[in-house]
Image (tube, rainbow, N blue to C red):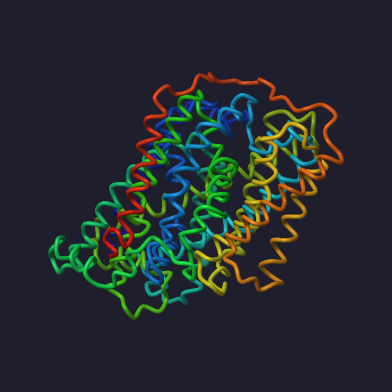
Amino acid sequence: MNLTGFICFLLFLALVAVIAIYNTRKLRLNTTAAYFMGNRTLGFWMVGFSLFLTNMSCNVLIGENEFVFTNDMSVMAWGMSSILAMIIVAEFFLPVYLKMGAVTTPDFLGQRFGPRLKKFVSIFFLASYVVSLIPTVLYGSAVALNGIFHVDAALGISYFAAIWLLVILVGLIGCCYTVLGGFKAITISDLVQGAGLVVGGILLLAFGLRYLGQGSVVQGIQTMLDSKKEHLNAIGGPHDAIPFSTLFTGMFLINLYYWGMEQYIMQQALAARSLSQGQKGISLAALGKLLAPLFLNVPGLIAVHLYPHLTNTATVFPKLIGDVLPPVIAGFIAAVVFGAAISTFNAGLNSSGTLFIMNLYKQWRRQAGDRELVKAARIFQLSITAVAMCFSPFISRFNGGFYSYIQKVSSFFSVPVFTVMIVGFLTKKVSEVAATTGLVFFIITYTLSQVVFDLPLHYLHVVAILFVATVVLMLLVAKWKPMTTPYTLQNQAVVDLKPWPSRYWFFLILLMLMAGAFILFSKAGIAQ
């Protein structure tokens, strides 16, 4: 472990903590609105950077660079195609949530279908955070930090023990942010860390290319473009790990769910002080997705040429940081990576508390005041952190790779909820019985398709087929048992609902740049 790099790592973390504490010193966290939503006072900078950094978790940094190293740039499709999903969310989903005054995305299901489905989906969300989100964030951050600082070698312990130690460290620090600082402290730290991530990504790219080119960035670029060109292609074939056709089936559905219905993501936008600020914030995050390949994918491309015989491919990203960067910059980027992990962890933890308190505990303890609700939220958040700490180190035992684990497990939780919510958005007479039937049907059939039957289809195509089948089933059940009174959206807005006037021009530019990125990393571009 390099002492200089470690000191820089600690100093940057301390700076972020001081900024967050200073800007929230007068904020009282004795109400649920302050603790969970920052009193709905976020401007577009905070919304955008918070969305961006929450998405840029360690599991994505580790997983996507590992995928590029072992496969090709086709994994870039997840981030690039999400730009279209984010535009749809900003234009159609966010206005609905803000108009009804939603605190959680299942609030829509409660108003649209009834309280039972709202509770069921809230429990479903909580299960996904405990099984998928929080453990993978802890594991990914532990892998990254051990790869940068070589904790196992420095302390003379096994790799598995080092991962477990770092998981506990990240969990405890993240818990302190959430439990002591609340939502506003999280978003302020995200603003600083997000700017640091952009700067760190550019520095890593520059130093990585110079290292590859033996002192010349230009020669490094030339080396990356002239050999092993199969790794440069983002247009996956039918038999690749991520076929390009999945952009138009399951990947689109999952992206639309993630950016428009996933509680820990949407909570950042729901806390905006107006619809206009929320739409600008989502657009800013979409712009960040265009820059994301600088640190999500290109380091993996550089590593392909530097480490042809690497066995533990999950260490690609942290190994590159440790090898190509000066100690001071390595410490800075380690802090940024750590901050990305903390950001996603905090978002998941804060959203878990919001779902549990507002949608479950509050229904059970109807007379509970804000102080009791905030206290119960803190106890619950500490409890699920402890559970996730125990589980996350064992992700290393999953057969198929870290990124495969993330995507397959998240699909199990995401698309069933997406199906029910999208039908709720687009219809007015589909009943709670139809929605519950569809939800259960999707969960059972998707589980069978992945665990019992060996289907000759990519799992994202299976997701799309089941989506269509579930929608048809819900519509048929609704014909049999429709709602007696068609649903109408109630206006309970607590913020200004005037939309951002210039959004369409910005959306068009984003879509053009998205298409350009696919052309660049294809056989029509640099992968020819």
Q: Is residue 353 visible?
A: yes
Query: With respect to residue 397, does 414 lie above or below?
Result: above
82 lies above or below 456: above
Q: Position of residue 373 (x, y in %)?
A: 69, 35
Which residue appears at 14% of the width and 61% of the height? 218
Q: Which image quadrant for residue 311?
A: bottom left
Q: Position of residue 248 (x, y in %)?
A: 52, 52
Quadrant of the rendering where the C terminus is positioned: bottom left
Q: How many marks?
A: 0
Query: Which residue is at a point 41% across and 29% down the rendered structure image?
Result: 504
Give the side of residue 486 with respect to residue 390, left or right: right
Who is closer to the viewer here, 80 or 146?
A: 80
> x and y percent of residue 51 in the render?
46, 41
* 154 lies left or right of 470: left
Determine which quarter of the picture holds residue 208: bottom left
Q: Is residue 369 left or right of residue 14?
A: right
Residue 370: x %, y % from top left? 68, 29
- Residue pictured at 76% horizontal, 30% vertical: 368
Can residue 197 be seen here? The reply is no
Q: Quadrant of the N terminus?
A: bottom left
Residue at (59% x, 63% y) in the render? 459
Front residue (pair 237, 377): 237
